[in-house]
Amino acid sequence: MAFPSSDSLIGLIAGTLTTLSFVPQVAKAWRRRSVNDLSLTMLLMFASGVALWLIYGFLHAAVPIIVANGVTLVLAVGLIGMKLRFR
Amino acid sequence: MAFPSSDSLIGLIAGTLTTLSFVPQVAKAWRRRSVNDLSLTMLLMFASGVALWLIYGFLHAAVPIIVANGVTLVLAVGLIGMKLRFR
């Protein structure tokens, strides 16, 4: 595997941050069993958009976009599941 | 202005969805004056990541990435402001 170029590295760090940012949110929602302040509309639009970013990443063969949005999609779907369950 | 190619179009739709998804979240937070269920760690990591995506977009001259992350950054900073104010 080639060492990533500096701009790919920025993309990888960016993707790591935006993706991992959902981990404390998922953890907080699970711990509190409360997602009242999260907007379901937001979560559904966000997950749909992330799914399209994933397709965009594949079309551009842009690895940071593929990895970041793949993981984010899983976490966003988890939040949607909790939103529907913890009413 | 050239008509966007089909993959740029997917990126534009993706960016529109992920970006506009924050509008109902900001509206809900403002209406309820409540952001208790939002994780501050999440918001700070997310905003930092979005700022780096913006740089990545400029380095790749990728218009959908620039526009989407520029607007998302503004909305995310708004949520951080409310998080700090509505304690």
Image (spheres, coloured by chain):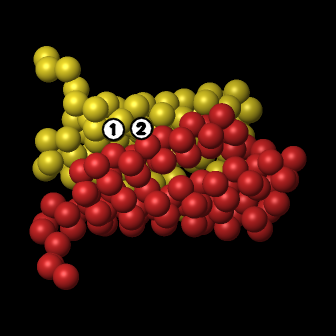
Chain colours: A yellow, B red
Residue most extreme to the top? A1
Q: What percent of the width, then of the height, locates residue A83?
A: 60, 46
Most foreground residue, B43 or B36: B43
Which disc is residue A14 wearing?
A: 2
Residue pictured at 15% horizontal, 48% vertical: A60
- Chain identifier of the residue bearing label 1 in the image: A
Of residues A35 and A63, the one drawn nearer to the viewer in this rendering: A63
Is disc 1 surrounded by few (<14), some (14 to 19) or many (20+) residues within 10 Å? many
In contact (CB < 8 Å): disc 2 and disc 1: yes
**Which SS class for mark 2?**
helix
Q: In this view, does A54 lie above or below B18?
A: above
Q: In this view, does A29 lie to the left or right of A44?
A: right
Task: Specify whether B52 is left or right of A5.
Answer: right
Residue B68 shows in the view: yes
Which quadrant of the view contains residue B12? bottom left
| Number of marks in the rendered image | 2
Query: How far across and how far down the image is residue B56, in percent?
Result: 33, 46
Name the residue rendered at 66%, 34% in the picture: B41
Which quadrant holds residue B3? bottom left
Q: Is residue B62 left or right of residue B74?
A: left
Real-space Cα separation, disc 2 to disc 1, in angstroms = 5 Å
Amino acid on which disc 2 is placed: Ala
- What residue is at 59 percent from the left and 60 percent from the top? B75
Residue A78 visible in the displayed image: no
Give whichever of A39, B77 is nearer the camera.
Answer: B77
Most extreme residue toward the bottom is B1
Which circle marks residue A11 in the picture?
1
| Amino acid type, residue under disc 1 in the picture | Gly
